[in-house]
Amino acid sequence: MNKKLLGAAALMAMAAVMAAGCGGGDKKAAAPAADAKKGPSGEVSVYTSIYPDIVDKLCKPNVSKAFPNLKVTWFQNGTEKLKTKIAGEIKAKKIGADVLMVADPSYYLALKKQGLLMSYKSPQLKDVVLASDPDGTWLPVRVNNMIIAYNKDKLAKEDIPTSWEDLTKPKYKGKIAMPNPMLSGTAYVMVGAMALDPRFGWDYFKKLKANGLRVEEGNSAIQNKLLTGEYMAAVILEENILKLQETKKEPLAVCYPKEGCIIINSPIGIFKDTKNPEAAKALVDWWLSPEGQKAVTAGWMHSVRGDVNPPNGAGIKLADLNKNAIKIDWEKLAFEEGKIKEAFRTNVME
Amino acid sequence: MKKSLPRLDSKFIVIAISVLLLLYFIVMPLLVLIYDSLFINGVFDISNYKDVYGKKVNWKALTNTIQLSLIVMVASVIVTFPLAWLVGRTDLPGKKTFRTVLVASYMIPPYVGAIAWVQLLNPSVGYLNEFLKFIFGLQKAPFDIYTMGGLAWVLTLFYSPFAFITISRAMEKMDPTLEEAARISGSSPLKTLWDVTLPLMMPSIVAGGLLVFIAAASCFGIPAIVGMPGNIEVMTTRIVTFLYMGDDKGIRDATALAVSMMVVANGLLMFMSWMLSHKDYTTISGKSTRPNMVELGKWKWPAFAVVAGYAIIAVILPLSSIVVTSFLVSMSKGLALDNFGIDAWIPVVTSSQYMESVWRSIGYGIVAACIGTVLALFVAYLSVKTNITGRSIPDLLVVLGGATPSIVIALALIVTFSGNYGLNLYSTMWILIVSYLVKYMTMSVRTIAASLSQVHISLEEAALSSGASWIRTCKDIIMPLVAPSIVAGWFLIFMPSFYELTMSNLLYGSDTKSLGVLLYELQTYADTQNASVLSVIILLIVLIGNIILNKVTKGKVSI
């Protein structure tokens, strides 16, 4: 038995070495070509909630092209899961990330309060049209947009929703859904924003509940059930719908509600404990540059710069989105998270 | 007595090492976590318990969990006992195929299966609901998956294989002489089953039932997918909700809930083992041959129809749903001929990144299963075959790990093995493997112990008194007798480790992304159809593995 075990362990070790070897080989091959312009070197680790396919297809290749001497490791997961991972790491006093790119801006306020973020005012900020932290601990890097989506093939013209208020109408009864704010960072922002907005408040969510609102685990469950026709209309991120619309030609469409969208200016920030501040700063600069922002819009999100086009298929420009956006009290969202989530649960999920 | 001392030594060294490993990897992290739930910076503080249990929803979640797990446990035993008997002990036609099919739902990652059932039974457009509406001219959908009943249904289908594997293994190893005696004395096959087989099977039934109970209680994927849209909260969804608050208080509240969940689960376990400890269940003696087969006679084909019907509903239906989904071009268009294609297959099969995760997880699963089976064998042996004081403690430790919600294990391991207490395993493959062992070894121990408890001590004594060492006795006498349960035990660790999600999701690093994580990513962020493709690939791998195993061992061993 022991021999077998050792054998297995050895095999694993070999596999690991081989895998590592392959990775290293690629890097070496790429390095000499761009040796002339020296960039930052060493290693830097990024935790991000950008969708994994976008990380693999856009972030990884573009960043390694921009910084040939830098080894960037990407760790991708949902915002709330990353928060949990980081909470564990803070507890163990070992934060594994240098750069953080999660969706929910209020989380950065919480981290800033704990003194965990580094201040960095990127020179690129001059072209960024969205607000950033005056102390420079977080800078907006991409825009996530919570909207209402529907399936063009499954809805009659008069049934297409145009406003948040529409979702409380009887014709949608039992056929509306939203992602669970306990599990999804962007859904939490949507709940916090609307519950604190006097036009909606918790009453709006109570009405949704009375209209048979289903709370789903995440955006993907919702997009699938829109496709199959299980739901007539649902709250979801714009980027999910644009991607399906443009790449798979699915008949999903976006409704930008009359009362305004939930614009989430998702930030980028650097952890104070980083061992490679130069590289982390260079990475932030790159993300805010037109080139980095093109990777953002190629990932179906809106850019934070005024001079970059919106993602393909988007029916609206950032400036127009922003004019009409629902105001969000980030401070409240950051420091009353427990209260807001609990209120949602008792009002909607009980 | 003196002569046997050296033998005892090797036994004790081996067992002592196993116990030490268990203490370090299971008990310590959990203790660290319990300590964390009770103390803040060394000061005793249970405000988190007060907060948590000051809310009605958490009590509701607790009762929901207990209620659901009990229903699922009882339903699983009621369904699998007759199935195991029919497949293992009768001349049921096609029983080998049935065995494979019946454990196949064990090979489908539960969260993938749950999605399949949601597709089949959702109240607005579920395939099966639509079909039944059409056939019977119903106005309303007959089933709603988003209910307690729906949740219990899906959990039973996906976790009853635990009971099936445990019960059918023991059934095939049973001493037939008692049954023969009953038959000769004029008892009907059914009466024999009721009076003799059922009582003899009691330890395995309880063991299998407990596995189901624990699995159902600590499952997150199925309640998240099926329960959440129906506003049904269970302990795991509450714990995750607290964890995802992403701050210290959230973690403390989560630990408070988790610790209470551990207490309930382990209380129940202790009660069960106390109940069983009063009876002697030795049923495999040295003299017996393989159990004989019951001839079903005129019941042969009706029985076949029942088993086949169950297999179709429990396995074929959700599997087909997954396979069909993987071949759809657009999820929006449904089942039309021009909507079939391999569009979803191409990105998966051509991406090295996907296959890398598959191989990586096979590796992790094999390592975890090998280490786990060896440890499980020693723990089971110690617990059922010796009379050392405290012999059942390691067994309890293993159960403790298994009864702990995955998410809590993951958290405990992060806190403990980030270098503050000796080892630093963070972001390595070993922290994943340790988590799999902590979580899944209990199934292996239960299975092997149930089988060991039926091997009479006389066989071992005979070997020892003929001069064999204890290790040799283990190798030549005990292992062959319980070999099928060892193989079953190996697979009981390998399979769930292979596609494990909840813990891997918190523990993986950038170089150790496992299959479960990838599948979940595809399922939740990227593309459900790609996830279906990957599930089909997993299933193919497992089925091929099974066929090879079956061929190599000439049909003696399969899962």
Image (tube, rainbow, N blue to C red):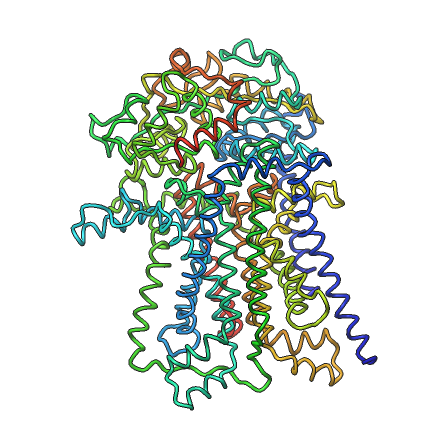
Tell me: residue A258, above or below residue A60: above
Q: Depth check: A147 or A316 in front?
A: A147
Q: Can you give x and y, in whole percent of width and height, for residue B211 in the image? A: 52, 60
A70 is higher (above) or lower (below) than B385: above
Residue at image coords 59%, 45%: B408
- Quarter holding the N terminus of chain B? bottom right
Q: How many labels does the image show?
A: 0
**Is residue A17 visible to us here?**
no
Residue farthest top in this picture:
A126
Identified at 53% across, 18% down, the residue is A331
Is B60 above or below relative to A28?
A: below
Outermost residue, right direction?
A: B2
Q: Which residue is drawn at 60% across and 42% down?
A: B507
The image quadrant of residue B505 is top right
**Quarter of the image where one finds residue B15:** bottom right
Left-right relation of A256 to A141: left
The location of residue B438, given as percent across then percent down, is 62, 53
The one nearer the camera, B384 or B367, is B384
